[in-house]
Structures are given as C-alpha cells and as structure tokens.
Image: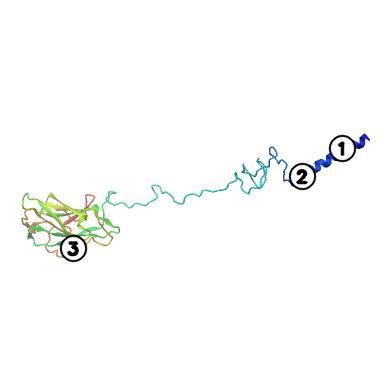
Amino acid sequence: MTMMMMKARTISTLATLALAGLCACVHGIEPEGPGGEGGSAAVGPGGGGDASTVGAGGSGPATTSAAATGGSSSVTAASSTATSGTGGSATVASSSASGSPVMGVSIEYKADNTPSNNSINPHFRVANSGSSAVDLTNITIRYWYTKETGSMTQVFHCDWAKIDCGNLGGAFTVASGMNADHYLEITFTGGSVAPGEDSGPIQLRFNMSDYAAFDETNDYSYDSSKTAFAPWDKVTAYSGGQLIWGTEP
C-alpha cells in the first residue's frame, strides 16, 4: 500500500513539472543562454542592450525590439574638402621679385612737339615680345634730356594713357652723360601687357613752372624723326633696378 502511494506521488510530481514547462513555453520565458546571467538572454556581438536576435557572449533581457542600442553602424563621412599644404597651390611670382629681370620688354617712342617749346611731350608704348604677361609695376622708364633753365621747378603731366593715367607717375632726377643732365623716370602702380601686345599710347608732358622754353635739339632721348611709334633705344627701361632695354647716355 505504501509503495503504491509513493508511485502515485511521483507521477503527480512529474505531471506538475511537465505542465509547468508547457506553461513556460506558452508565455515566451526562455531559459538562461550560454554565458548569460539571471535568466537573461545573450546579446549578439557588439551589443550591450536590447536585441531581437539572441546570440552568444552578452547579457540583457530578451526583447522583440528591432534595434540594438549597442550595435549601431552609423558612419561619419570624411569631408570632401581638402586643405592644400604649402605646395598645393601654384603662385605666379613676378620675375623681378625673384631677382631676375623681366625679359622681352622694349620701349616704343614718338616725339609729339617741335624741338623748341615750353614743354617736352614724349609719348611711349611698352611692348612685350615675351611669352608671359608683363606686370608694369615691375617696370620703370627713363627719358634723358638737358634742363637748361636753372633751378626752376619741373612739373609732370599725364595727358592720356590707355592703361589710365592713374596707374603711373613721374619724377625728375639729376643725371650726367652725353646730352643729358636730367632724366624723367616713369613708374607704374598698375597695368599689365599681354604677350605679343603693347600698353597702348602713354602721352606725357612736362614743363618748367614758369613755362620757360626747352631746347630739345641736344637732348639724348629726343628724336624729331620719330613721328610714329617705333622702338627707340635712347629711352631706357628697367626691371628691379636692372637695365633691360636701351642704352644710357
């Protein structure tokens, strides 16, 4: 009788355990996975939170959430704008800045007045036979002459210039040489001449402050036969202080 009662209790216990297992499956309770703690499901590689797919090696409650907070794969794209270094951009330097004179420059001259007058009116063009544009701010021109009228002040004028009179200036300097005791130096603050081109006419004039007459027949740079623009080597040009055209007196 006692033996029969023990068997009955065993059967009852097994039935209870089976029923509990069935209920667990129905309610979605999963057993502890490999490496898990406290009955929690393992999360896939790289995860630290919820995951819909359970893998090995992590911890966290099982869930049906579609996102794994620890498994983000967002990528930060690199900027497409590159900052160039010191060798990343090309810089065109003027030849005079590098210490070499500008080449291919010649001065064309035209006389625009009679040799005895109260003003000297030299006209110029800067011609460029080189292969690169000439920056006129690197160029100076000298017109050589005799003053003849003592200590009176000389006055410079630009009557017209294709490159704009505002881009040039003139100054007078005492000199010495054949048929020259002064020169007018023309400087530029702007303008350029393309290869194979010229500056266009630069129409200049200077006079004494009292408009005393000059005698240009003995002036080094004057040539009454130049009634049209032509190269003239008795008007000199300089680049960086170096003579690049003409012959000084």
Occupied quadrant, residue 11 = top right
Circles 3 and 2: CB distance less than 8 Å?
A: no
Could you tell me which residue is drawn at 92 percent across and 35 percent down? 3
The CA span between labels 1 and 2 is: 21 Å
Mark 2: secondary structure: helix
Quadrant location of the N terminus? top right
Residue 141 locus on image (x, y percent)? 19, 54
Residue furthest to the bottom: 228
First reached walking from the N terminus: tag 1 or tag 2: 1
First reached walking from the N terminus: tag 3 or tag 2: 2
Could you tell me which residue is drawn at 90 percent across and 36 percent down? 5
Could you tell me the amino acid type at mark 3?
Ala
Report the residue marked by disc 3: 230
Report the residue marked by disc 1: 9
Residue 156 locus on image (x, y percent)? 13, 54
- Give the left or right position of residue 221, taking residue 200 as reference: left
First reached walking from the N terminus: tag 1 or tag 3: 1
Could you tell me the amino acid type at mark 1?
Arg
| Front position among marks 1 and 3 | 1
Could you tell me the amino acid type at mark 2?
Cys
7 relative to 242, above or below = above
29 relative to 134, above or below = above
Report the residue marked by disc 2: 23
